[in-house]
Amino acid sequence: MIDQEPMAVEVEQLGFAYPGEPAAFSGLSLSVPRGSVFGLLGANGVGKSTLLKLLVGLLQPASGRVRLLGQAPGQAVFSRVGLMIESPNLYPHLSGRANLEVMATYRRLPRQRVAESLEAVGLQPAGEKQVRHYSTGMKQRLGIAMALLHGPELLLLDEPVNGLDPNGIVAIRRLIRQLNEERGMTILLSSHLLGEVEQSCSHVGILAPGRLAYQGPLSQLREMNQQGLYLRIDCPEAGRALELLLQQGWMAELGEGRSIRFPVVQKSEISRAIDCLREAGIELHQVLIEEDSLETFYLNLYL
Amino acid sequence: MKNVALSCLKAEMQKARNSMALWLSIVGTIANLLLFFGLHWAGEAAVGGFSAQNWGQYVVNHYDGIAFMMLPLYVIILCSLVFLMEYRSQMWVQLFTLPVSRWAVYSGKILFLLILFLGAHLLFILGFLLTGLLFGLLHPGSGFLQQMPPWLQILELAFRTFLSILGLLGLHTWLSLRFQHFIVPLLIGILGYVVTGLLGPAWPWQFLNPYAPTFLFMPQYRGELQLPTLGWLSWAEWMSIAFFILFLFLAYRRLERVLP
């Protein structure tokens, strides 16, 4: 029954506030499809880590319901979920390998898993080194190895590329893709980097203060934003041009100065609109194509 | 259930490798032994020669030496260090999202604390037996090689030492979880210890003081203090057990509410 659950993570009407503070979330709902790489995108301090903590029961919601792989967060589901929240949680006085061995003992896993996890993140050569001597990137990778140790079906990663150099970022991105494609792992990662989410994820949830502004496939978000194509024309006879364009069915409006701005659905409309104005003898000083990017969409949420 | 508890204890043992708690237990115990050996050596030299020694007195001297200050201080620091391992790197996030209960994680930790204490105490006993033998080898007239160590006396003192630290261990487990800080419980501990010393063993409310049992068991053993007893144990020892249970319960309640 549990395996038929189509959503790896389901959050319904979640409400939460830290004591003495305004509500961090109110009525937030989130669905992460199985087999997806879901990027939870949001600015620093918007509540990404809080949301992840709520998902695994480290914080208790004031209202709403959370299901991970069809089960309430708790011991029963923790054998199927791997996580790294806020920063990699590691014992600095132990070696990388010993850190994994401790967790393998708690989970009663065979020692072989330790070597496999170290290998998966490319940390085998540094396995015997004490964690206090690890670089930020190595700690990050060890944190991911810890989350992978028990072969989870669902992986929750909070800012997995934080503090990594470009090589490290590429390596983590490749690892995420590999885990998703080869092992069918559902991955929910949080990030404040739009580019990172665009490159790693199949789905995205955009967290604005207190609410989820968008969730769904990344491709759908791109499509939505492709519709945000505008043509801006500067011309001395802006009034006549506006009238003409409105007559032809374009939703044109007067912009700043002597400019007209209107949305176009297909790029072929651009030349049609120009031809129409030129045929009417209207002189054009400048023609600009403006495109609403994902970045514009994302930034607008915080304005 | 049994396997889960054993796994948690084993994990605690693995964490102890190279940890400050383990180093404190080993180095602290050896430092104490060297100190007491030096004091005995100097004491004997000061009275102008090595007189026939009594194993029994030698053992009591060692327990007197630790019970006064080292023992409570060791327990206080040990508790702080064992919990410091977890909150310094926010390890609660990992521990609370394991497929094992918080109770199992907690019991593993408490068992580990007790085992570490007992291990250090065993090292202490072996150490003073060895230094006693060394005394005998260096000065055959001292009499250590001619007598057997007083095994029953050692066993009784070890047992009473263990009972006396239980309340303190419980209290500082709770304080460590309550404050999630190394220095605060340490300062409270030192304050508790100083106040207990100032109030003295005759203070009538001493039975309500969890710092008192480590202070009282040696004077009572030497017969300098008569505490009411119930069965084989004094009220201080019974109270130590009661404090252990009470504070471990409070500490677990606290752990249930710990937010990583």
Image (tube, coloured by chain):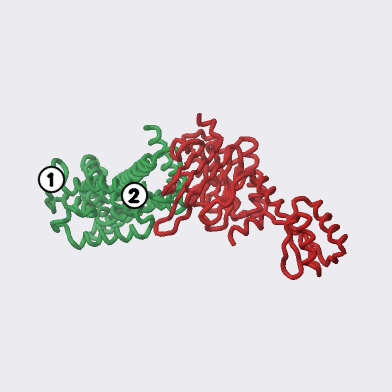
Could you say which quadrant of the image residue B199 lies in? Answer: bottom left
Side (left or right) of A230 relative to A24: right
Up-down relation of residue B198 to residue A127 (above or below): below
- What chain is tagged by disc 1? B
Viewer-nearest residue: A154 or A39: A39
Side (left or right) of A234 relative to A293: right
Element class at badge 1: strand
* Residue A114 circle label: none
* Residue B229 circle label: 1
Marks 1, 2 in one chain: yes
Q: CA–CA distance between discs 1 and 2?
A: 33 Å
Q: Position of residue B200 (x, y in %)?
A: 17, 60
Viewer-nearest residue: A209 or A157: A209
x 46%, y 47%: residue? B93
Amino acid at circle 1: Thr
Side (left or right) of A256 relative to B94: right
The chain drawn red is chain what?
A: A
Q: Position of residue A236 (x, y in %)?
A: 81, 70
Element class at badge 2: helix
Chain B, hue in figure: green
Side (left or right) of A112 relative to A222: left
* Residue B254 circle label: 2
Q: Position of residue A240 (x, y in %)?
A: 79, 65
Q: Residues within 10 Å of mark 2 (few under 14, many from 20)?
A: some
Q: Nearer the viewer, mark 1 or mark 2?
A: 2
Residue that lies at the very extreme toward the top in this rendered image: A1
Q: Position of residue A216 (x, y in %)?
A: 61, 45
